[in-house]
Image (cartoon, rainbow, N blue to C red):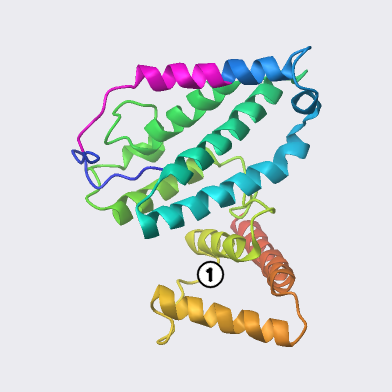
Amino acid sequence: MSGGAGAHAQPPGGERPVDADALGAVADLVAVVDRLRSPGGSPWYAAQTHASLLRYVLEEAHEVAEAVGAGERTGEWDDLREELGDLLLQVVLHARLAAEHDGAPFGLRQVAEGVAAKLRRRHPHVFPGAGAGAAGAAAGRAPRTAAEEEAAWEPRKAAEKSARASALDGVPAALPALQRAQQVLERAQAAGLVPAPEPAADLRTPAQVGEHLLRVAAAARAAGVDAEGALRSALQAQEAALREREGARARARR
């Protein structure tokens, strides 16, 4: 998600017009996928489901991350262009499958409209009158830093997700355990379920944290323990305790 450093901040090169060629290229991709899914098209594509495509979504997302790392190291971005294309294909495929649903179908248009509307709601200083409602009324002045803007997103996200029973709902179970643990703890802190952590004196930089995690992985390997599985199990127990604490707090308010 794009963040803003200020009301008038622009990306490098300034605000750019809509690229009609890009829109046409996306429309061409949609047409290709539609043809592959149609009778007389590709048996493989015709056989796919949301569930069968999950592994490819995850693989492509990881390959995008790898391509970003390679690009940062080498300054070459051709691999990223290709991997973003593969990830875009997965989005278009899932939207095509969703358009075939018997109940409440939706397509790529609704997907794009939904995320565009969300971005407008979460940036009321950029898009005034975008329907931010009470969550955006307190926006006041435009945020001056990315950190300020990220903090301002939290009440807007909470308003959007008010139907969720728990602040911890919605963290994908399929995430790697370490990434999921960070998201669960971040949400727990935002909800006031845990205090803000104090950084350890020797774990203040990415290099220090990375070395510490490597030592933990080595210790787990020496003990014959699956580190990913162990963290996932510990996180499940922690999450259950946090949900119980959240429930007790809600009951006390009644």
Residue 106 appears in the picture as rendered = no
Which quadrant holds the N terminus? top left
* Amino acid at circle 1: Val
- Please state the total of marks drawn on the protein image: 1
Please tell me which residue lies in front, 179 or 90: 90
Residue sitting at x 36%, y 26%: 130
**Residue extending farthest top:** 39
- Residue at 45%, 33% (x, y): give it: 118
The quadrant of the image that shows the C terminus is bottom right
Q: As displayed, is residue 228 above or below residue 119?
A: below
List x then y, in percent, for residue 64: 52, 48
Relative to 166, say whether 125 is above or below.
Answer: above
Which residue lies under the disc numbered 1? 194
Name above or below for residue 69 compared with residue 46: below
Q: Position of residue 111 (x, y in %)?
A: 55, 26
Q: Which residues are magenta?
A: 13-29
The answer to whether residue 86 is above or below residue 175 is above
The residue at the point 25 percent across, 48 percent down is 5
Which is more toward the observer, 55 or 5?
Answer: 55
Q: Quadrant of residue 229?
A: bottom right
- Does the magenta segment cover residue 25? yes
Q: Does 77 lie within the magenta span?
A: no
Picture coordinates of residue 151 (x, y %)? 37, 53
- Whether residue 115 appears in this view of the structure is yes
| Left or right, residue 201 beside residue 129 | right
Crowd tier of the residue under label 1, counting other residues whose Cα lies within 10 Å: few below 14, some 14–19, many 20 or above: some
Q: Secondary structure at mark 1?
A: loop
> In the depicted view, which residue is nearer to us: 227 or 193?
227
User: Where residue 51 sits: x, y (%)?
Assistant: 77, 38
